[in-house]
Amino acid sequence: MQIGLIGMPLSGKTTIFNLITEQHLDTGPGAKSEIHVASAAVPDERIEFLSDLYHPQKTSPARIQFMDLPGMCSQNGTAAQGAFLLDKVRGADVLVQVVRAFHQDFVSQSVGEPNPFKEICDFSDELLLADLAAVENRLKKLKEGRKLPKDVVGQIAFFERLRSALEMEIPVDNIEMTEQEKEYLSGHHFLTEKPLILAVNIDEGQLVSGDYPGRARVFSFAEQRGIPVIEICGLMEMEISQLPLEERIEFMNDLNLQESGITRLARAAYGYLGLMSFFTVGEDEVRAWTVNNGTPAQQAAGKIHSDIERGFIRAEVFHYDSLHEQGSPSKVREKGLFRLEGRDYTVKDGDIISFRFNV
Ligand SMILES: Nc1nc2c(ncn2[C@@H]2O[C@H](COP(=O)(O)OP(=O)(O)O)[C@@H](O)[C@H]2O)c(=O)[nH]1
Ligand SMILES: [Mg+2]
């Protein structure tokens, strides 16, 4: 899974990228305008428990890839520049908009006082503009290109309809389409079609008070649109993440921060995308695998290897909670909490599975 961190300049994208992927990239007005990509382990206490129990040679938590883009907005540069940058995240599965709520004098001097609600609305225009530019591009190719598709007339009509909608600030996600039109759309990766999460970047004072200007508006807007919101104390969490582990835990406790930014972000993304984890365990490796809710056992096996999916015989399954309660796999077996399941069994979040297969 790839998550693209996007947002207005100086909203704290690189700070949050550093915190999540444990990097030390420059932040602030002087930072270089470059794109960064790195992955982060999805924190999961279950995988830690399993690793302590099985002592495997290797422990592999689920991972998410993050992409950090330079600040962008058409007010600073041109719309074309903004669209160019945003084009880079078209491949992402989820977009996280970092929104500035924190107070920092030199940032306010450069880009104005924080106004989270306005920033969200303005940025949503940037996304619409970037999609509009992509539609214009497509239309240009359809009208002037050499290798035209058979149904060029239908495609032109569709993309013109898309253009009018975007001009009226309607996101691609809200446009009704026929199956045929959905096919025209596939492969284009419009930004206003992607799942969006808002990450409001707050400062310590706001963390303590639990409030910042415009908070209620942000939440009611997000609720109306079905957009998840998380609040991250970016700078402080970045500083904490760069401490040794023990001090880290102490600091988090002192601040009453139960969960790190990445934990909450990963949970929001998993929940939003309908994802969950199952585990495989053994002396070699304890590993988390990410699948969609509702995935049948045989298909889940394909996550590991296509041979296992093809030669699927059965899944031997017990649940993490049973293991956690009973303390050992043999007790789980004794209590009859160990099951054999067939190919159509729907995998549950937290299942520990061993696949039997034949190739
Ligand atoms: N006080 C405070 N400052 C922050 C916070 N997050 C980012 N900053 C500062 O805001 C500036 C811009 O951050 P940066 O991550 O470079 O923003 P980007 O342009 O969106 O990548 C930097 O000087 C950061 O130190 C925060 O949570 N609190
Ligand atoms: Mg940056």
Image (tube, grey):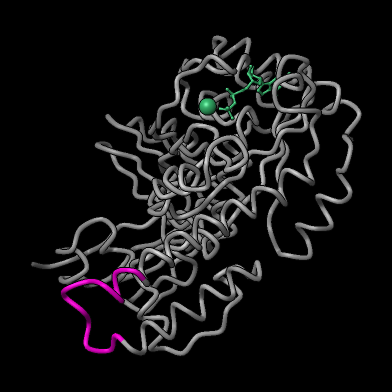
Residue 270 sits above or below residue 178 on the image: above
**If the picture is divided into quarters, which one holds ligand 1?**
top right
Name the residue nearer the viewer: 23 or 77.
Answer: 77
Residue 81 position, x and y percent, is 46, 42
Which residue sits furthest left? 359
**Is residue 90 a member of the stretch shown in magenta?**
no
How many labels, in total?
A: 0
The quadrant holding residue 298 is bottom left
Which part of the image, by quadrant, shows the C terminus? bottom left
State the extent of the magenta-drawn residues as a range.
140-152
Name the residue nearer the viewer: 9 or 64.
Answer: 9
Q: Residue at x 77, y 32 (%)?
A: 101
- Can I make out residue 62 in this image? yes
In-image side of 60 versus 348 (left or right): left
Q: Residue at x 25, y 64 (%)?
A: 302
The quadrant holding residue 345 is bottom left
Residue 343 position, x and y percent, is 31, 76
Residue 281 sits above or below residue 54 on the image: below
In-image side of 161 versus 359 (left or right): right
- Can I make out residue 335 in this image? no
Q: Residue at x 46, y 28 (%)?
A: 21
The quadrant holding residue 352 is bottom left
Q: Residue at x 43, y 55 (%)?
A: 278
Residue 283 position, x and y percent, is 27, 37
Residue 327 sits above or below residue 333 on the image: above
Name the residue nearer the viewer: 26 or 57.
Answer: 26
Residue 268 position, x and y percent, is 62, 50
